[in-house]
């Protein structure tokens, strides 16, 4: 059952029904009493709409009015997203940080990137050990035990989406800055992250 969305006319009718009867309490829409109540009822109708939107706005992927509060709680916005990121990009970043409870597995990083709106694969490396690798394998130092690579498309486009974007946003944006910054933030401190932008 959805929340009732009362209009100003509903509040006006309710208030007029609650008023006492008599000449001092006119019901005529052109009376001073009705005009004063109409002015108040518009505010109550607006509050009702905001209260009904609160359920949707409290959920990170659909937040609009509460988005600045979500961002402040999660340490956003950051410079990686640029000076004016789109609503869709801001919501995706909030969702990724909120849902990213931590992990160090390949599926975790793939899912984290997916929440941001990117498709990646992960390559893990190992140091070269004589007799364990085939001929022609890259010679890696001991640092390779802690090195991993995120492979992302060279160009990632974020398209305008009705209901998820606002009227003043471009129809498409391109870039991988947010992905790179977010992965740098959530990677384990002892690891080395390489970003490879290739056509997947």
Image (cartoon, rainbow, N blue to C red):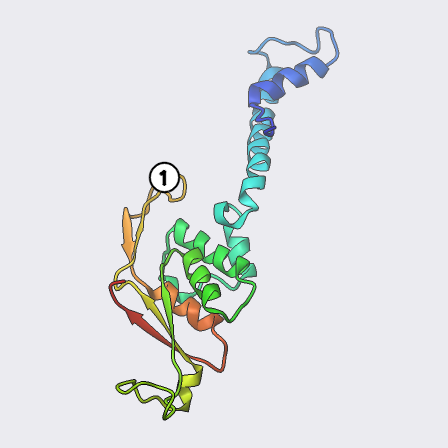
Who's the residue at 29% across and 48% down the image?
Answer: 170
- Snapshot quadrant of residue 193: bottom left
**179 with respect to 186 (left or right):** left
Who's the residue at 45% across and 60% down the image?
Answer: 111
Residue 101 position, x and y percent, is 56, 63
- In depth, the one of 110 and 95 nearer the eye is 110
Check the image and report above or below for 185 versus 174: below
Who's the residue at 63% across and 15% down the image?
Answer: 13
The residue at which mark 1 appears reads as 162
Who's the residue at 36% across and 93% down the image?
Answer: 130
In this view, which residue lies farthest toward the top?
A: 23
- In depth, the one of 52 and 139 nearer the eye is 139
Check the image and report above or below for 11 versus 86: above
- In depth, the one of 178 and 188 nearer the eye is 188
Note whether residue 167 is visible.
yes
Residue 113 position, x and y percent, is 41, 61
């Amino acid at each position: 059952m959805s929340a009732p969305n009362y209009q100003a006319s509903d509040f006006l009718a309710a208030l007029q029904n609650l008023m006492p009867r008599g000449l001092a309490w006119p019901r005529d829409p052109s009376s001073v009493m009705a005009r004063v109540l109409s002015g108040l009822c518009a505010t109550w109708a607006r509050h009702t709409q905001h209260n009904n939107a609160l359920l949707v706005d409290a959920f990170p992927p659909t937040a609009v009015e509460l988005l600045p509060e979500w961002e402040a709680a999660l340490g956003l916005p950051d410079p990686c997203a640029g000076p004016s990121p789109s609503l869709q990009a801001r919501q995706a970043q909030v969702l990724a940080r909120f849902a990213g409870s931590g992990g160090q597995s390949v599926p975790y990083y793939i899912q984290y990137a997916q929440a941001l709106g990117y498709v990646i694969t992960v390559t893990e490396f190992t140091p070269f050990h004589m007799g364990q690798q085939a001929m022609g394998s890259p010679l890696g130092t001991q640092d390779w035990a802690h090195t991993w690579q995120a492979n992302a498309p060279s160009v990632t486009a974020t398209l305008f989406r009705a209901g998820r974007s606002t009227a003043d946003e471009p129809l498409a944006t391109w870039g991988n800055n947010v992905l790179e910054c977010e992965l740098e933030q959530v990677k384990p401190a002892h690891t080395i992250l390489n970003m490879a932008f290739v056509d997947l």
